[in-house]
Image (cartoon, rainbow, N blue to C red):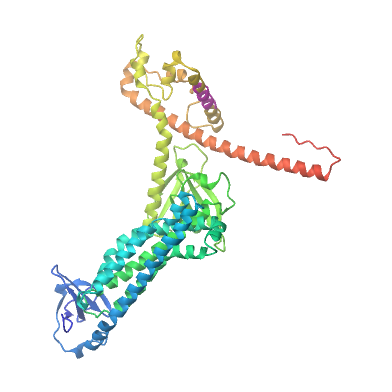
């Protein structure tokens, strides 16, 4: 293949299933770029390079006049070989300039900021992120391209080298892009101090921190230019063509990721209209955020998943702010993946958890853009709900003490009864209580009274009431005849455990409601006091008294 390109003619039509496979019809003339012993060859047809089965073609021995104008004649191939070094030099020079700029940013600008101690160690760590790793990666890119460009033309594999480096580059740059919005937020926060420190050249810092992803956005253009100057028979043509597609995807993914993190920071810093409740930042880190369409109206919504809550937002008409639409505690919901129908595809539903005795919620059907998004939302919500349930149930398990049944003393048939959940240890240690234990009992009693009041007002479907919360009575209700105990002991124990777990969930829900009421009461009291002060100023002759 050192001279004329090796041509083959299609004996059968072939339609590739993957994007790296070449499609052709019977009779097409293909320029072979790589001959592989595995039964697949690589070739070019109509400027598209891809793999195809070698037994679908035969050698073409016709003259050059049988070729289409798109095929590469010798003179065009020579011209391409002549200009390819210019293209590679341009890529190498721009990569060197990029590395120099990153080195200047780290050694001058960022080191000055670090020494000034304007930023905390945590803030500086967020700004510098994995910039050292990014710099090392681009030095590796430069070294590899220079090494390949020094080889003979037909041995150069720049496209293959760049393509093989793509997975590593993708991970490093995605990590950098995920942290960049936080860095920009910190710079804006300390803008005045940084302006004085850097003599008004904060723009040097902000533009320098954006260079890594700006550089990656230029890679597809460099690779396309290199592809244009590879003759159709060059063995690196296919890898270069595939590298163009891969790096376009990387640049797009990084851009979407940065925008996603920018929105998360906006939400975490109070950029939500109509927000109700505690500070959003106190809800924990955002686990997942994404846009969905809520069926049947197909309203656009943003779902934001926190460790304990699913937040629902909408965007303003100008897309300039988020608007609060509601929130759901993960302890009270279940999520199910839905099969595709005529009405929706890639959807999942959010329904009330039957075991949760809180307020009823309406069924929500959320439609995702892709199957991957659908599965990711379902998995993450289920995982967080499971983790939350485990955290709630863990303290309960420590309160079980089955050894109490083996303690010394008079034996009776009542010892065969199931152990009362969560209170056995306290009953057993009654004789050696210290003041701290007494305080714990008083707190437990308060919790039981809250449970009693809540259960009575909610008219629960469970049979537990204020009497059944007394564990002495509970054991009486659960007493069984001796022949029945062996068969039903385990079942009753599971029933009691489930009941206590559900009661604890309801107490948590009630505590959240109480906190909300306390906050509303505090705001109302403050507003009334302000009103009283204003009225006293406006009407000094009238004595007003606003009762609490």
**Above or below — where is 74 with respect to 427?**
below
The part of the image, by quadrant, that contains residue 427 is top left
- Where in the figure is residue 77, as x and y percent of width and height? 24, 84
The part of the image, by quadrant, that contains residue 136 is bottom left
Quarter the N terminus occupies: bottom left
- Where in the figure is residue 298, as x and y percent of width and height? 49, 59
- Residue 193 seen in the current view: yes
Residue at position x 57%, y 62% in the image: 317
Residue at position x 48%, y 65% in the image: 204
| Residue range (magenta) | 440-449
The part of the image, by quadrant, that contains residue 177 is bottom left
Q: Relative to residue 515, is residue 369 drawn left or right?
A: left
- Where in the figure is residue 454, as x and y percent of width and height? 54, 31
- Where in the figure is residue 281, as x and y percent of width and height? 52, 47
**As rendered, which of 257 and 330 lies closer to the eye?**
257
**Above or below — where is 231 with respect to 217?**
below
**As rendered, which of 18 and 285 lies closer to the eye?**
285
Determine if the magenta segment contains residue 459.
Answer: no
Quarter the C terminus occupies: top right
- Name the residue furthest right: 541
Q: Relative to residue 153, is residue 99 drawn left or right?
A: right
**Above or below — where is 369 with respect to 53?**
above
């Amino acid at each position: 293949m050192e001279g004329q390109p090796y041509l083959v003619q299609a004996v059968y039509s072939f339609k590739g299933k993957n994007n790296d496979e070449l499609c052709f019809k019977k009779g097409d003339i293909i320029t072979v770029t790589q001959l592989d012993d595995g039964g697949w060859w690589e070739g070019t047809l109509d400027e598209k390079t891809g793999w195809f089965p070698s037994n679908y073609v035969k050698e073409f021995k016709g003259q050059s006049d049988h070729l289409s104008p798109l095929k590469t004649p010798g003179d065009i191939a020579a011209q391409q070989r002549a200009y390819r070094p210019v293209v590679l030099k341009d890529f190498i020079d721009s990569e060197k300039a990029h590395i120099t700029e990153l080195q200047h940013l780290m050694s001058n600008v960022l080191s000055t900021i670090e020494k000034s101690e304007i930023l905390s160690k945590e803030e500086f760590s967020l700004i510098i992120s994995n910039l050292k790793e990014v710099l090392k990666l681009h030095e590796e890119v430069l070294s590899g391209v220079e090494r390949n460009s020094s080889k003979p033309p037909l041995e150069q594999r720049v496209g293959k080298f760049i393509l093989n480096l793509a997975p590593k580059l993708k991970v490093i740059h995605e990590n950098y892009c995920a942290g960049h919005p936080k860095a920009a937020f910190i710079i804006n926060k300390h803008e005045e101090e940084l302006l004085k420190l850097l003599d008004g050249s904060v723009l040097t810092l902000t533009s320098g921190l954006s260079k890594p992803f700006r550089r990656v956005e230029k890679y597809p253009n460099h690779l396309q230019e290199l592809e244009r100057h590879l003759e159709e028979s060059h063995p690196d043509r296919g890898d270069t063509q595939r590298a163009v597609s891969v790096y376009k995807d990387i640049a797009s993914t990084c851009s979407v990721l940065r925008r996603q993190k920018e929105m998360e920071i906006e939400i975490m810093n109070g950029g939500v209209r109509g927000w109700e409740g505690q500070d959003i930042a106190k809800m924990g880190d955002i686990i997942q955020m994404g846009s969905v369409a809520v069926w049947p109206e197909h309203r656009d919504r943003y779902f934001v998943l926190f460790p304990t809550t699913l937040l629902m937002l909408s965007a303003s008409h100008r897309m300039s702010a988020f608007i609060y639409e509601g929130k759901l505690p993960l302890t009270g919901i279940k999520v199910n993946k839905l099969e595709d129908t005529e009405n929706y595809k890639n959807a999942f539903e959010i329904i009330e958890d039957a075991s949760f005795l809180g307020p009823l919620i309406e069924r929500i059907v959320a439609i995702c853009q892709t199957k991957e998004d659908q599965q990711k939302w379902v998995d993450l919500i289920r995982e967080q709900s499971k983790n939350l349930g485990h955290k709630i149930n863990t303290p309960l398990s420590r309160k079980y003490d089955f050894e109490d049944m083996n303690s010394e003393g008079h034996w009776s048939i009542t010892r065969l009864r199931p152990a009362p959940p969560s209170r056995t240890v306290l009953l057993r240690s009654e004789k050696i209580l210290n003041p701290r234990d007494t305080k714990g009992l008083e707190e437990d009693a308060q919790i039981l009274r809250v449970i009693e009041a809540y259960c009575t007002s909610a008219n629960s479907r469970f049979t537990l009431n204020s009497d059944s919360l007394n564990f002495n009575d509970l054991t009486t209700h659960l007493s069984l005849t001796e022949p029945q105990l062996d068969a039903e002991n385990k079942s009753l124990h599971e029933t009691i455990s489930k009941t206590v777990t559900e009661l604890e969930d309801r107490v948590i829900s009630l505590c959240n409601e109480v906190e909300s009421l306390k906050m509303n009461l505090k705001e109302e009291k403050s507003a009334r006091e302000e009103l009283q002060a204003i009225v006293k100023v406006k009407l000094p002759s009238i004595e007003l008294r606003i009762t609490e």
